[in-house]
Amino acid sequence: MPNFSMEMAILTSMILGLIMAFFNVGGVFALVIVGFVAVFLTKDEDASYKVGALAAILLALLYFVICLFTPPDLPYQLPNAVTIGVGYAVDGLFTLVLGLLVSVVIYGLFGSIGGYFADKLFKSQDKPKNPRISERPKRIIKRKQKPQRRTLNRR
């Protein structure tokens, strides 16, 4: 595994995710790839599924900010906001926040799945082996010693 810092690995995987989105490749599969690449590029000490989830969540926030400022292509003219009322605007704000939360959860889930696969495939699994226990352990018998007698004479 390459030994990039966690920040550099997350940034690299986010750039890969943006490139995949630009070429319209992947969808949900792209999120798993982003998490996989983020964990693959980090150092062994820092690599875990949480790095993949963090990379995918940051990608979701980046998509949210980009899509917040790009208007949709609507086939009709929206009515005036004054005629609709304030309740409609509050409902739209609630939908916006709820969409952000749901997308962060889904992106984090798929990023952590990719990170988990990278962690299990490429991280060195250095677990200590269990030592072989002999058939019969040696018995050590300790005898009680008598306590010293107390005397008035000091040494």
Image (spheres, rainbow, N blue to C red):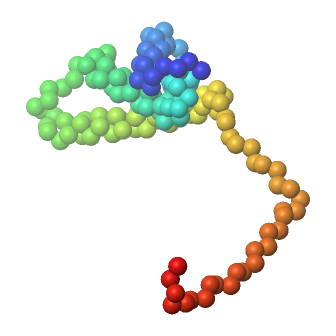
Q: Residue at x 51, y 24 (%)?
A: 42
Q: Residue at x 75, y 74 (%)?
A: 142
Q: Is residue 21 visible?
A: no
Extreme residue toward the left, this view: 82
Q: Is residue 132 above or below residue 78?
A: below
Q: Nearer the viewer, residue 10 or 105?
A: 10
Q: Nearer the viewer, residue 20 or 68?
A: 20
Which picture quadrant has residue 134? bottom right
Question: Would you say 88 lies left or right of 97 here?
Answer: left
Extreme residue toward the top, this view: 23
Q: Residue at x 43, y 31 (%)?
A: 54
Q: How many marks?
A: 0
Residue 32 screen position, x and y as percent: 55, 26
Q: Is residue 86 visible?
A: yes
Question: Would you say 34 lies left or right of 60 here?
Answer: right
Residue 120 screen position, x and y as percent: 64, 33
Residue 104 screen position, x and y as percent: 40, 35
Q: Is residue 106 above or below residue 80?
A: below
Residue 124 screen position, x and y as percent: 65, 30
Which picture quadrant has residue 79? top left
Q: Residue at x 14, y 37 (%)?
A: 85
Question: Would you say 9 lies left or right of 92 here?
Answer: right
Q: On the rendered image, what quadrant is the N terminus found in?
A: top right
Q: Nearer the viewer, residue 27 or 143?
A: 143
